[in-house]
Amino acid sequence: MDKTKTTELDNVVVRFSGDSGDGMQLTGTLFSNLSAILGNEISTFPDFPSEIRAPQGTVGGVSGFQVHLGSSKIYTPGDDADVLVVMNPAALKVNATGVKKHGVIIYDVDSFEKSDFEKAGFTTENPFAELSISDTIQLIPAPLSSLTQSSLDGFGFDNKTVLRSKNMFALGLICWLFNRPIDQAIHFLTNKFGKKPTILEANVKVLTDGFNYGNNLHLTVSTFLVEKSHETPKGKYTSISGNKATAWGLIAAAQKAGLQLFLGSYPITPATDIMHELANRKDMGVKVVQAEDEIAGITSAIGAAFAGSLAATSTSGPGLALKAEAIGLAVMAELPLVVVDVMRGGPSTGLPTKTEQTDLLQALYGRNGESPAVVMAAGTPDDCFHYAYMASKIALEHMTPVILLTDAFIGNGTSLWKLPKLADLAEIKPNYAKAGTEDTTKVTSRDEKSKVRYWSFPGKEGFGHRNGGLEKDYATGCISTDPFNHEKMVNTRQAKVDYISNFLPDVKVEGNVDADMLVIGWGGTHGHLMTAVNNLNKAGKKIALAHFNFINPLPKNAVEVIQGYKKVVVCELNSGQFATFLRSKVPGVEFLQYNKVQGQPFTVAELEADFSELL
Amino acid sequence: METTEVKSVLYTAKDFKSDQYVRWCPGCGDYAVLNSLQKVMADLGIAPHNTAVVSGIGCSSRLPYYTSSYGFHTIHGRGAAVATGVKVANPELTVWQITGDGDCLAIGGNHFIHSVRRNVDINVLLFNNQIYGLTKGQYSPTTKKGFVTKSSPFGTVERPFRPAELTFGARGTFFARLLDVDLKNAQSTMLAAAKHKGTSLVECLVNCVIFNDGAHDWLAQRDTRADRLIFLEDGKPMIFGKDRDKGLVLNGFNLKVVTIGENGVTEKDLLVHDATCEDTTLHFKLAMMEGPDMPIAMGVIRAVEDETYDRAVEAQIAEVQAKSKIKTFDDLISTCEQWEM
């Protein structure tokens, strides 16, 4: 054994990259989960093409999975990789600029042949020179394919099946590199392939051989050690993706409210996993209608809300556009409804698998008439649970549609999640119409203070009513075209949404409160902004972050907080939508902007560079 | 449906009338359908609070305001999807969907075929007046080719839909047809639709006195109606005519009108209606009959039993729940791959 040295790091970024059929997502997931079990903070981000199987070995088919491990709190999947594992030259090409100066690139030398270079569009047989890869980066050629072949020699699999296991060889090698025992990986594989013993045996064999190969490497490779995190609050944890957390937030809210959960939805990237998860939860009594289109997705949900369910629909930007008229119906009929928009690159079909925050103004204003709805946004994969729960609570308690914005980055990314107990979650108490009280029976009967109308639905005797999209008389609930009544109803619906600010937590100022500059963000960028702000404060700068999860209405202290800083920069993955919104709400502030519309999350480095310049 | 008979004494049509002033044009065919519906709701014996009436947009879609049940006047074309949500959320409810030829077959065409395909247990009254009334007289997907309207000043050049064909094409389990002014048959047809488990599509031929007056005159005229309509009844021979002397027989692959007593034809030679036949061939032929050579088929043309979507959803949930140890959210959490930190 020739382990020359071990480098201890506070945090490390590993990126796995290969063909979309190479199993990089599974490899990355297993590695992050076993690291979490060993006590690391984790954050992951999958980056896959919209083509299911682009031509093998081409740049268009490259699929990646990035894992960030930390021995202290980490907020993002990281910018550049410490270790990049590439299965072919195309993957190298796509990721070449994303490796740290003293990083390591492990590549499958068996897939670095002349024909592979051609497929990836290289013109020479030296891709590293062609990409000008710095000689400070250590290159480790590993014959992953051929070693996998010899590892599975006696199994009698065809070559295609054999090569499908090379990701496990890579995982074994990485486990060695990071001083991770492979027992936990074997445990995961047993859970996954337990019903297919031969496949399980093959995967375990390749994994073990990969680990041993690392052990026997007579190269001057230093291994990495990322210690256990001691900052994470004690408790039971799992790792969860934003989309799954969103689905579970809805499930928890339904049980807490004592209601049936109904989802009407239509498949759309990158939101479909929410529907998958809920369709799989028949044990929890969830009813899912996979509708014929986006409009039927939301209108069936509105029907279910009318009939007394906690109703939701899940979609992404183009789908939100199609649902606009129906959201207006939910506004007008004052029905509880949760609309989840997992934002992606737009407009039109745009960049379906990439992340953006470009639907904010659509969520706020994209409807006919004066049509206020609650708009909120989750910040990390794990807090999608909390905000989906809160979206349901607000919808049910305030009888309004709530649009919850997440995005491809947090929807598909994973983070650690401290497991909740239902008993610890906030109560959900809808404003039901009460039997025997005459003034709660009309469809427009409402609590005069909160403007929340009383909820009754079919099956309840004594509350029969006619609801709909036509304007109603404030007092009688009958249809009305009276001009003054219409204005009163418009104002009432607005007041009802505004009143919700009384129940929202204050926006927090993180970082250095007495800062020279306030960074403002919202939704899925929290991790990158927080990391950049923390790094700058550590470097002696004075900078603060106000990150928003509630947008309409804004938290009550928002205006005062923002007005308290000389310099304010709004950072978002669009051309300035939240900045535009804030300009209409917060007078006397010059809002600077930092915007990125590339379908990719921020990098901490670019944020630090920009903030340093502004300070 | 034994309980129906017992309960039917509980309600009268009046119990299903709301206090709202009905605002259709004087002479509109919708009044007759509304009155028939309220009578049928009473005969069904389902309480108003267990009844939901859902509609889209258009003249006929105002109907929910005029019944005392729970009602929901939604957005254009989407009534079928909203009704699907209502019924799936609570299969115990009796759900009526009120729609027109524009609402159902133009803007709502997609939802229409898919609710029929799924066989959601809702009763659909499709008010077909072959015109857009509420927007004041444009041609609809059922307007006859060549018809002059405000949006087709030189006559339409479009081929119309025939609702029965769409229903059968979408694998519909129930199709019936009624005429607004024929109250007795309209009520029995609606009642059959309400009792059918699945999407019951009832094409209601209604007259728009303002924009398409007399569209159904050929078959609706009282003095010639008996000769131009055939009211189909399951298990009974296909007889029609003022003198009950005409009938239908098969001639090769086609239907043919014959006269009893002529050319040795007796009642026994006539086709007997089988609405429950799974094969749609004859139902197609019957539903497609057109004047002047053939009578228009009315009543229940097709009524086939099949599993309904709303019950299938419930059954699948029950099946999974019976096997699963996960009963609560906390159970669900306990299934996570989890570790102490």
Image (cartoon, rainbow, N blue to C red):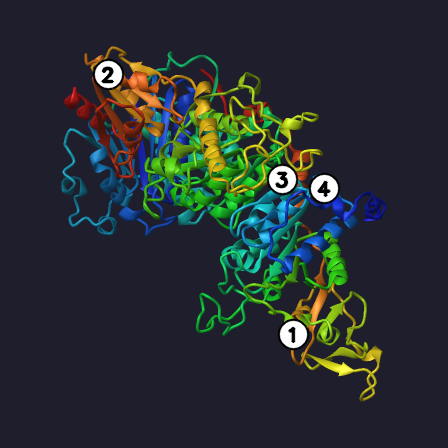
Percent of width and height locating residue A301: 54, 40
| Secondary element at image label 4 | helix
- Judge left or right: residue B296 versus residue A368: right
| Discs 1/4, front | 1
Task: Say yes or no: labels 3 and 2 on the same chain.
Answer: no
Task: Say yes or no: labels 2 and 4 on the same chain.
Answer: no
Decide which of tag 1 and tag 3 comes sooner along the chain.
Answer: 3
Q: Which numbered dot is residue B48? A: 4
Q: Which residue is mark 1?
A: B218
Mark 3 residue type: Ala
How busy is the neighbourhood of tag 3: few (under 14 within 10 Å), some, or many (20 plus)? many
Decide which of tag 4 and tag 3 comes sooner along the chain.
Answer: 4
> How far is mark 1 from mark 4, CA to CA?
37 Å
How busy is the neighbourhood of tag 2: few (under 14 within 10 Å), some, or many (20 plus)? some
> How far is mark 2 from mark 1, CA to CA?
79 Å
CB atoms of marks 3 and 2 within 8 Å: no
Q: Quadrant of residue A217?
A: top left
Mark 2 residue type: Tyr
| Secondary element at image label 1 | helix
> How far is mark 2 from mark 4, CA to CA?
60 Å
Q: Which residue is mark 2?
A: A565
- Judge left or right: residue B247 versus residue A335: right
Q: Which residue is mark 3?
A: B89
Percent of width and height locating residue A445: 59, 30
> How far is mark 3 from mark 2, CA to CA?
50 Å
| Discs 4/3, front | 4
Q: What subunit carries mark 1?
A: B
Mark 1 residue type: Trp
Percent of width and height locating residue A272: 46, 41
> How far is mark 1 from mark 3, CA to CA?
43 Å
